[in-house]
Image (cartoon, grey):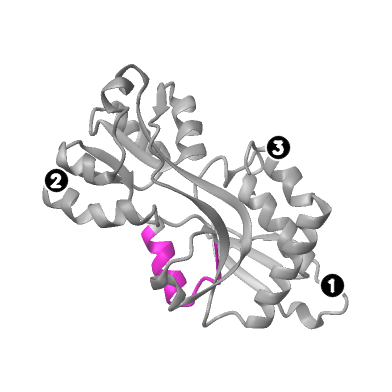
Amino acid sequence: MRARPFFLAALCLAAIPACACHLRMASESWPPYIYSGESGEPAGADVELAQAIIREAGCTLEVVPELPALRREILFRQGKLDLMLAASRTDERRRYARFSAPYRHERVGLFAATDKLPQFAKIDSFDAIVRQRIAVLAPRAGWYGPDYARAAAAQDAGAWRNTFGTFRQGIQMFRAGRAELIMGDAAALQHEARQQGVALTALPYVPFSAPVHLMLNASSTTQEQLARINNAITRLEQSGALATIRTRYGLH
C-alpha cells in the first residue's frame, strides 16, 4: 500500500496565493534529528526546526516515505526532491543547490570503545589514522570535513574504511568488530550507542564542526523562496524560537 505523504505547516499565509511555496523532501531514520514518532509521523529536532521555519515562511512541506541516503541524494540532484536537511555547503553542491542561512550547528565526532580510548587519544588527523592503518566505520554519504575527504581514497586503497547506511547499522557493525573507530554526527552516534548499550567515548580530535543549512534544489526552487526561508530563520532566531527547540534536544 502506498504511504500517504505527511504535511508540515499545511496552511499558507493568506497573502501568498495558492500555496506557491511547496517543498518536497524524503524522510530518513536519523534520531535525534528525524525519526518516526508514535503516530508514524516524522519527529525530531530537525523536523521541529524545519516545521517552524517553513511555517514562518508561509510555505508547505511534503515529507514522503523514507529512502536510502544515496537514493535520496540522487533524487535531489534530479530535481525530484526540493529540500534536504542539515546540509553543509560544499563547492560540488553549489552546482545544483542553494543554501539557507544556518539553523543549527553540527559536530562530527570520531569515537572509540570507552575501554580502548587511551590507545587512540593522540590521533590528530585522518592522515594519522591512515599511517597507523586503523579501521574506521563512516557514513556512506555526506560531507564530514576536508581532512576526512582527503584521506578517504587512501583508506579505501588499504581497505581500512567500511561504510554504513544508518546509525543503527553503524553501531551494530561496530559491536561486531568491523572497525576500531566509528565516525559520524556526534549526537546521532551517541543516541544510537545508548539505544544499543554500547559504551562509546569521543576522541579529542574533532574531524569537523560547522553550521548546517537547509539545502534547496536549485532547479526546482526559486531565489524568492530561499529569501522567504532566510527571513523566517532571522525572525525565529531573534524571537528565540529556534533556540528553544535546539535547547530541548541539547543542540546548539
Please say if 41 is above or below 228: above
> Label 2, on which residue?
159
- Quadrant for the C terminus, please: top right
Q: Mark 2 is on which residue type?
A: Ala
Inter-mark Cα distance, 2 to 3: 40 Å
> Residue 162, percent across and down?
24, 44
Residue 198 part of the magenta segment: no
Inter-mark Cα distance, 1 to 2: 53 Å
Please say if 1 is above or below 31: below
Out of 251 and 4, give the one closest to the viewer: 251
Q: Are the two marked residues, 1 and 2, in contact with CB atoms closer than 8 angstroms?
A: no
Dot 3 crowding, Cα within 10 Å, few <14, some 14–19, many 20+: few
Residue 13: which numbered mark, if any?
Answer: 1
Residue 82 part of the magenta segment: yes
Q: On the picture, is 227 further left or further right than 162?
A: right
> Label 3, on which residue?
248
Q: Residue at x 48, y 27 (%)?
A: 195
Q: Residue at x 76, y 56 (%)?
A: 237
> Residue 3, percent across and down?
56, 58
Q: Residue at x 31, y 39 (%)?
A: 124
Q: Mark 3 is on which residue type?
A: Arg
Q: Residue at x 32, y 52 (%)?
A: 147
Dot 1 crowding, Cα within 10 Å, few <14, some 14–19, many 20+: some
